[in-house]
Image (cartoon, coloured by chain):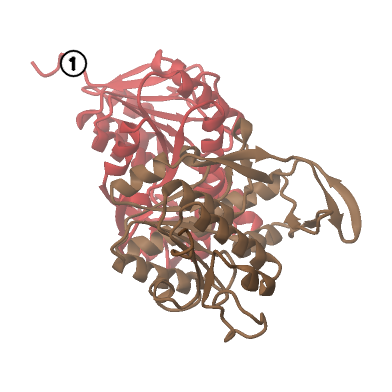
Chain colours: A red, B brown
Amino acid sequence: MLVIKIGGGAAIGEGGYANFATDLAALAKPVVVVHGGNAEFSRLSSALGMPPRMVASAGGRVTRYTDRATMDAMLMAYCGKVNKTLVATLQAAGVNAVGLSALDGRIASGRRKPVLRGTEDGRVKVFRDDHAGTLEQIDPRLVRLLLDAGYLPVLTPPALGEDGVPINVDGDKLALALAIALGADGLLFFSDTPGLLADRADETSLIQEINAAAPEAALAVAGGRMTVKVEAALDAVARGVGRVIFADGRAEQPIQRALAGRGTTIRAESTVHS
Amino acid sequence: MLVIKIGGGAAIGEGGYANFATDLAALAKPVVVVHGGNAEFSRLSSALGMPPRMVASAGGRVTRYTDRATMDAMLMAYCGKVNKTLVATLQAAGVNAVGLSALDGRIASGRRKPVLRGTEDGRVKVFRDDHAGTLEQIDPRLVRLLLDAGYLPVLTPPALGEDGVPINVDGDKLALALAIALGADGLLFFSDTPGLLADRADETSLIQEINAAAPEAALAVAGGRMTVKVEAALDAVARGVGRVIFADGRAEQPIQRALAGRGTTIRAESTVHS
């Protein structure tokens, strides 16, 4: 079973969805798709007069402040436009997709952190009524029910906070947690890069493989968000996911290419535990 | 098994959703919820610079012209905001809801009619690239799978057209078709009226019961959209649905009230077939 995360950047648009749909129609394995929707979310909230408000924590992590109205825009962008456009594209290719948020069937739940402290536009502020949260629990029963019946689940944030309030959780972390809970033999992350690059300015400097037993060299070249992704991949492999691949979501036949090794593959070194 | 349609008018807001959630948490029967989202749809599309364009057909029927951008707004309003807000409200009440569009799992599919001819602002025009459609097929397998596993499905338009294009279908008709396909013993329509009124200006003039074998008196007082609803109810009863109830979605304990007879109930006269 594979878990496939399709990034929500602007570079993978509807043409990109069609490439995934063609690949998924040909794939003989059960698959769970997790998607983002950040570009659509920013576009919608800006059109509604709520441009993204980015807040840097003391530790340097940048998050988006998500008040109630912004969460409504997130529901509209992620669960409405992106989720259903992907489902319709998959259905058009003959794949019987079922689109869900992580709220549905309590697939993913967690703890809301309503107060956000950090720096916006150079000033330290306190932001109240934030809808960010931390993933704490995965209930894979609904996803398994759908897979066993032959459906392809298409999942998206947000997740469910206490008291039923939707919480904004990271899509990569959701995909990771699902892959572990489902015992996936592969977890594929697709974004607008060919994989982990030794030189971020040079798309030909792809690192093809990372040995999870000796990741130091790879971590040394990964920067910013890519460091988080590589650490998550190492975690996934340590917790039983067969392999993790970072690959290009802008390509034709993106899944076939990734499974054939065109991307960065992280796997456990099978001879380590002797 | 009950199918419950919650209207998408502005009068049933999030307070209304909480009333439904409390009732559904206490109900011992399997339930499928179908909801609208028209007020939210109009509000969003107007905010995005696309106010509703209403077109009257030669027969006098008024429909909303839904081009591609308007369909995107429909996905955002119906499948994003309304569907997930309802699911979150149900989850908060302890009901394990699963929100789906009729696209998902091909629950409802139909034929798109891309060319719309009619009158807008007094002028006869031809509108191309419309996303309206006619419901043709219900596949109840996904809904049954969820019910059998103890989930409460929460469904919304749009449905799936040929080639995977989402089509705007009427939520009442979707609820009706599902009730028939699932063999529901009750179909409850909730909107911003106490039921069918003998005098539309007087909320106390409720018609409590319509005998499906002799509906002429009720049809004579129903006007406009209510005539369509009563005819659909008669059709449902003729096709095996136990009873159809039109009731007030603005009330507390709306489902309990409706099942207790506070609304308009349409049922087959059991002694007719002698």
Above or below, B214 relative to B273: below
Question: Tag count in the figure?
Answer: 1
Query: Percent from the top left, x then y, of residue B75?
Result: 58, 49
Q: Quadrant of residue B229?
A: bottom right
Residue A249 sits above or below residue B174 on the image: above
Q: Chain of mark 1?
A: A
Name, please, the residue furthest toward the left.
Answer: A274
Q: Nearer the viewer, residue A179 or A65?
A: A179
Type of amino acid at the residue the image marks with label 1 = Ser
Q: Quick one: A127 or A135, which is closer to the camera? A: A135
A13 relative position to A168: left or right = right
Q: Residues within 10 Å of mark 1 (few under 14, many from 20)?
A: few
Q: Which residue is mark 1?
A: A270
Pinpoint residue A130: horizontal percent, then vertical percent.
42, 63
Quadrant of the rendering where the C terminus of chain B is positioned? bottom left
Would you say residue A150 is visible in this rendering?
A: yes
Say left or right for A103 vs B82: left
Q: Is residue A201 visible?
A: no
**B174 horizontally vs A136: left or right:** right
Q: Foreground: B96 or B70?
A: B96
Residue shown at 26% from the left, 46% from the top: A139
Q: Position of residue B45 (x, y in %)?
A: 68, 57
Q: Residue at x 84, y 54 (%)?
A: B58
Instruction: Provide residue A56's location: percent of width, then percent of height.
Output: 44, 54
Question: In the figure, A69 relative to A175: above or below?
Answer: below
